[in-house]
Amino acid sequence: MIFSSYYHTITVLYICFVWQIAMIILFGIFIRYDEESDAHWIEHRKHKNISSDIENDFYFRYPSFQDVHVMIFVGFGFLMTFLKRYSFGGVGFNFLIAAFGLQWALLMQGWFHSLDYTDGKIKIGIENLINADFCVAGCLIAYGAILGKVSPVQLMVLTLFGITLFAVEEFIILNLIHARDAGGSMVIHTFGAYYGLSISAMLYRPNLDQSSALHGSVYHSDVFAMIGTLYLWMFWPSFNSAITDHGDAQHRAAINTYLALAATVLTTMAISSLFQKHGKLDMVHIQNSTLAGGVAVGTAAEFMLMPYGSLIVGFCCGIISTLGYIYLTPFMEKYLKIQDTCGIHNLHGMPGVIGGIVGAITAAAASEAVYGQEGLINTFDFVGDFKDMVPSKQGGHQAAGICVAVCFGIGGGVIVGGILRLPIWGDPADDSCFDDEPYWELPEDEESIPPIVQYNNHMRNKDV
């Protein structure tokens, strides 16, 4: 490594300290409570003839916020603990970059979406907190591609630029293009996946096989990772419905996600067993591919996808994601020089693109007969500058959103990956990847352990 562990730790502490001071200053200048979280709420109630505090958005959004918050810190965190010697890094660095990034996300998204031009302040409420978690999710997805191969300082740089890029592409897709993407198939998953994959390609390590003994799991690490999977699976309906319109749209988004996830589990189990020797299941597929339906139904979650449509989406994604782990991940590493530690292309990349396509088709096929006139206007927000929009044109705008997300992900990843290649970040050596020891104080009985027989390398299917 370029820096010793001591100096690297000092660098991390210095960056965290300076960053937090900067956030305090910027929040002091720009951030204020919105009208529903300000002490003047009582006056706002009277002015708007609101009869009860129950009408405050907090009571509608906070349950979803809690679910999304658990997904970010527990779901994503524990999902990354599958590596036999990188559990501290998986869950700990997830904790670090999420807390690091959500503050910057409130500012970046606030400047684009919540800026009050009368006083130049960003007004935040419960929905802003949900959107900040969504923003951080894109960076955590990218983290999965380079898990175990970078330093905490590199992760902070990835998060700083990732959130900035996210805020810009989100504004372009949702506001300028006017695409609908409640569950973030395009804005969150597609962008995050291709951002991470591009960075991984830029940081390609031809000698990573020196750490191959640690590039795998053991029995208990896979059990911990399964905890993350279950939290993500259970709360994904909240993720896809958290910021949809109150009423039928939110109700519909939860139902569609619920059904897509259920279909994905059964399909993943079947395909995993079919392609494994002796019909046994692969825990890699169960941890990851079972979630692909939630990703793919995100864009169309609030549309009239219909329950059977949700099952079809989940069914298809279970097949595509599982086969991606079996065949595509090894292909990408061998021929495209993309070392995707967590297989984010199979869980977020391909399902995210599929979700965007499903959203475009569903929007283009929308009609008054299915939605009703008012329902069509409300679902697709055909008001203001877009009051003359028709469903067929909306479908084209949805497709354009996919292109923007992919371009920002790949382009931003190449640029940020180039920055992270500079020899100043204290990244681990090729023979020290996937190991907590360079960055964590480990318990004494774990400091030096005998080599562990490789159980599962999470990358190759040797039985096929």
Image (cartoon, helix red, strand yellow):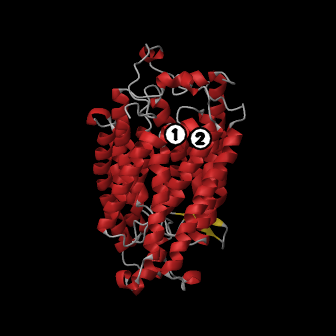
Which residue type does callout 1 highlight?
Phe
Which residue type does callout 2 highlight?
Leu
Q: Which residue is mark 1?
A: 331
Residue 292 at x, y = what percent?
A: 40, 51
Viewer-nearest residue: 168 or 98: 168
19 left or right, relative to 260: right
Residue 196 at x, y = what percent?
A: 57, 45
Secondary element at image label 2: loop
Circle 1 residues within 10 Å: few <14, some 14–19, many ≥20: some
Secondary element at image label 1: helix
Residue 73: image quadrant is top left
The quarter of the picture where the C terminus appears is top left
Marks 2,1: beta carbons within 8 A: yes
- Cα–Cα span, label 2 and label 1: 7 Å
Query: Which residue is rendered at x = 39% and y = 44% of the image?
Result: 288
Query: Which residue is rendered at x = 27% and y = 33% of the image?
Result: 278
Circle 2 residues within 10 Å: few <14, some 14–19, many ≥20: few
219 left or right, relative to 8: left
Look at the image and tell me whether residue 130 can be seen: no
- N-terminal of the pair, mark 2 or mark 1, is 1
- Disc tally is 2
**The label number, if any, that marks residue 154 in the structure image:** none
Instruction: Tell me if residue 392 comes above or below residue 343 in the rendering.
Output: below
Residue 93 at x, y = what percent?
A: 52, 36
23 left or right, relative to 308: right
**The label number, if any, that marks residue 336 in the structure image:** 2
Viewer-nearest residue: 326 or 367: 326
Residue 403: image quadrant is bottom right
Look at the image and tell me whether residue 268 can be seen: yes
Instruction: Tell me if residue 18 comes above or below residue 3 in the rendering.
Output: below
